[in-house]
Amino acid sequence: MIKAKFEKPTVIFFESSVFPESLDYLEAELRNAFASDCDAVVLAIRSYGGYSYKLPEMSRLIDKVAKDKPVFAYTDTVMASAAYWIGACADRVYIAPSAIVGAVGAYSELYDFSKYYEKQGIEYMLFRAGEDKARIGFDGQMRDTDKAELQTDVEESWKEFKSCILAHRKIDDAHLQGKVFSGDKALKLGFVDGFFDSIYDLVDTLKTGGIE
């Protein structure tokens, strides 16, 4: 149950791609907020996403903070992919009507330079010790077994992503296939809980007791 009025909400701005280094910053800010006398935490997110490293650990940290004080997530632009993984862990998610959220999916991309090298007369040589060492050559070549394993890794990451989302929000699996949503559709599908034009409006509402 979220109380209606907060006297000392703290805002953590996260305006970055999701990398281990940016999550180090977010972790420090969350731990500081947890130890402080603030009575609510607002994650102000502007991010298209990034890597999945450390996100399961980050979600558990947000859950820990939320047991002590409510956590709200907000974006006025983009909270997508790995960034939505973070935001969806909050007790409530709010956006500006024009913002986009979602992109619940995973991918890995590589380039195959082998034909270019061949055309340029470049011979790429790889000397390997250990069956699974250097599975991706500098020229982008991979064995079929390695491609299959990489596809499995991507699918497992997606499953973990979806599992976290569904643990925090009620969204039909059909809408967790990588698309982004905005406005009323994002609200209808369960990605967000409401709208504020700016982070300042959200914080003012928290202070004046407008959150139900």
Image (cartoon, rainbow, N blue to C red):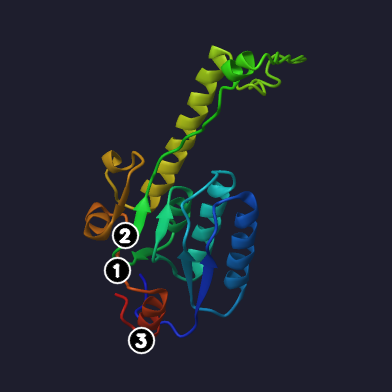
For image coordinates 26% across by 60% down, the residue present is 183
Left or right, 199 with reference to 20: left
For the residue carrying disc 2, how many other residues have a C-alpha within 10 Å: few (<14), some (14-19), or many (20+)? many
As drawn, 73 above or below 189? below
Q: Is residue 114 left or right of residue 42?
A: right
- Dot 2 corresponds to which residue? 192
The percent position of residue 40, horizontal first and vertical second, equals: 47, 75
> Are the two marked residues, 2 and 1, in contact with CB atoms closer than 8 angstroms?
yes
Q: Secondary structure at mark 3?
A: helix
Quarter of the image that includes the N terminus: bottom left
Identity of the amino acid at label 3? Thr
Report the Cα–Cα distance between label 1 and label 3.
Answer: 16 Å
Residue at horizontal 29 percent and vertical 48 percent from the top: 171
Q: Amino acid at mark 1?
A: Phe
Mark 2 to mark 3 CA distance (whole Å): 21 Å
Residue 45 visible, this angle: yes
Mark toward the viewer: 1 or 3: 1
Task: Answer left or right for 187 relative to 158.
Answer: left
User: x%, y% of residue 126?
Assistant: 73, 15
Instruction: Residue type at mark 2: give it.
Output: Val
The x, y position of residue 21, in whole percent, is 65, 54
- The residue that mark 3 highlights is 208
Q: From the image, tell me which residue sits under label 1.
A: 195
Q: Please say if 206 is above or below 121.
A: below
